[in-house]
Image (cartoon, helix red, strand yellow):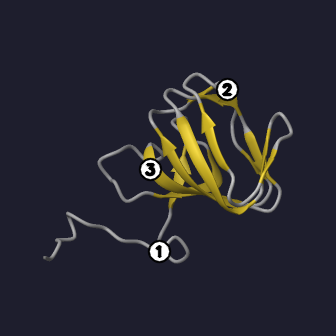
Amino acid sequence: MTFSDQDRKIANIHDAEYRPFVYPDGQAFGDDILQLDTDMPLGEGFHVYRMPPGMTTRRHIHNGHEQFLILEGELIEDDGRILKPGDLVFYRDGTEHHSYTPNGCLLAVHIAGPEVSTR
């Protein structure tokens, strides 16, 4: 059986082309996303999220559950919890938080709906 490029997409997280993530207000912080499902808005559904060293995400509320797996690097949550490669995290719908990475990180993420910035 063969698949068309419309039916199956394959990308390697280490050498694929990531797209810059730009917030609805036009602001960008250097983070970017690898997302194969182009029917979903960028940053929703399943994607790989890359944060550059020193980046802090905006404080936001989740509109739907968020789950992520740390693939590389370190992520520090606003409560001081340090997440490392192999940590799988679940945030319930309505959870508010922000994250910081001192040296950059790579995450596999599933977000059910758009995040709402609280800033």
Q: Residue 96 carries which label?
A: 2
Dot 2: what SS? strand
In percent of width and height, residue 113 lies at: 45, 33
The Cα–Cα distance between marks 2 and 3, rounded to whole angstroms, is 20 Å
C-beta proximity under 8 Å, tags 2 and 3: no
Residue picked out by circle 1? 12
Dot 1: what SS? loop
C-beta proximity under 8 Å, tags 1 and 3: no
Q: What residue type is labelled 2?
A: Glu
Q: Which amino acid does label 1 sit on?
A: Asn
Is residue 26 among the parts visible in the rendering? Answer: no
Please count the marks in the image: 3
Residue picked out by circle 3? 46
Q: Is residue 100 left or right of residue 34?
A: right
The Cα–Cα distance between marks 1 and 2, rounded to whole angstroms, is 31 Å
Quadrant, the N terminus = bottom left
- Foreground pick, 89 / 96: 89
Q: Residues within 10 Å of mark 3 (few under 14, many from 20)?
A: many
Q: How crowded is mark 2: few (under 14 residues within 10 Å), some or many (20 or more)?
A: some
Q: Earlier in the sequence, mark 2 or mark 3?
A: 3
In percent of width and height, residue 77 lies at: 78, 40
Q: Which amino acid does label 3 sit on?
A: Phe
- Foreground pick, 101 / 29: 101
